């Protein structure tokens, strides 16, 4: 008969008794340089009965533009200027609110503005998304899919995903 302690589970138990950690599949020993991803033991696939944020996206904080978000571009008169990113990097994880202290909302809308690029019957849309933990340079903080929409007339169109970021998949 096969023992229920066979396989990776037994290796993990044996590793705990010997004083070193095992992670991943197939089980690897933790070294002083690399210890694997940080997960709660036994919860590699998340909590058993999650209660928070079911079906809701995580509300990320507002971040101001940094120096690496601007690009140095020439102007028509030969000078150079720092230009802000286009489309604007708006935080779409929070609801649209009027400016702080405003008595009347100057932008009476309940949805975020979109900035499509149109030429004849072709339209490109880019929806910037704020990454939760941008590892590396700060310019990697914003990402998002670029979609090409070709309008055929008569209300028919075909959307195509042109570019995407592997961090969003």
Image (spheres, helix red, strand yellow):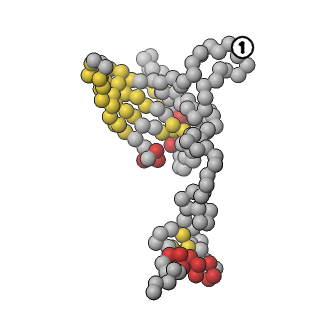
Q: Where 144 sits versus 1, above or below? A: above
Name the residue rendered at 52%, 27% in the picture: 88
Name the residue rendered at 62%, 78% in the picture: 16
Q: Position of residue 125 (x, y in %)?
A: 40, 28
Work out whether residue 6 or residue 30 is closer to the camera in this orientation and state it: 6
Q: Where 86 sits versus 165, above or below? A: above
- In the figure, is residue 82 to the left or right of 166? right
The residue tagged 1 is: 103
Q: Position of residue 65 (x, y in %)?
A: 59, 32
The picture quadrant where one finds residue 46 is bottom right
Name the residue rendered at 55%, 42% in the picture: 55
Q: Position of residue 92 (x, y in %)?
A: 55, 32
Q: Where 69 sits versus 13, above or below? A: above
Q: Is residue 152 visible?
A: yes
The tally of labels here is 1
Crowd around label 1: few <14 · some 14–19 · many ≥20 (10 Å): few
Q: Residue furthest right?
A: 101
SS for callout 1: loop
Name the residue rendered at 46%, 84% in the picture: 2
């Amino acid at each position: 008969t096969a023992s229920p302690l066979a396989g990776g589970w037994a290796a993990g138990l044996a590793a705990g008794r010997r004083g070193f950690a095992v992670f991943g599949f197939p089980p690897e020993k933790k070294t002083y340089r690399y210890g694997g991803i940080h997960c709660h033991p036994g919860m590699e696939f998340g909590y058993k009965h999650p209660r928070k944020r079911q079906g809701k996206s995580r509300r990320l904080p507002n971040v101001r533009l940094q120096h690496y978000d601007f690009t140095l571009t020439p102007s028509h008169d030969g000078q150079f200027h720092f230009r802000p990113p286009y489309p604007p990097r708006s935080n779409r994880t929070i609801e649209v609110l009027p400016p702080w202290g405003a008595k009347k909302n100057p932008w009476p809308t309940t949805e975020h503005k979109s900035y499509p690029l149109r030429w004849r019957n072709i339209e490109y849309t880019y929806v910037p998304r704020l990454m939760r933990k941008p590892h590396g340079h700060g310019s990697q903080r914003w990402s998002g899919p670029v979609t090409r929409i070709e309008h055929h007339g008569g209300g028919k169109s075909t959307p195509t995903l042109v570019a995407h970021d592997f961090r969003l998949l």
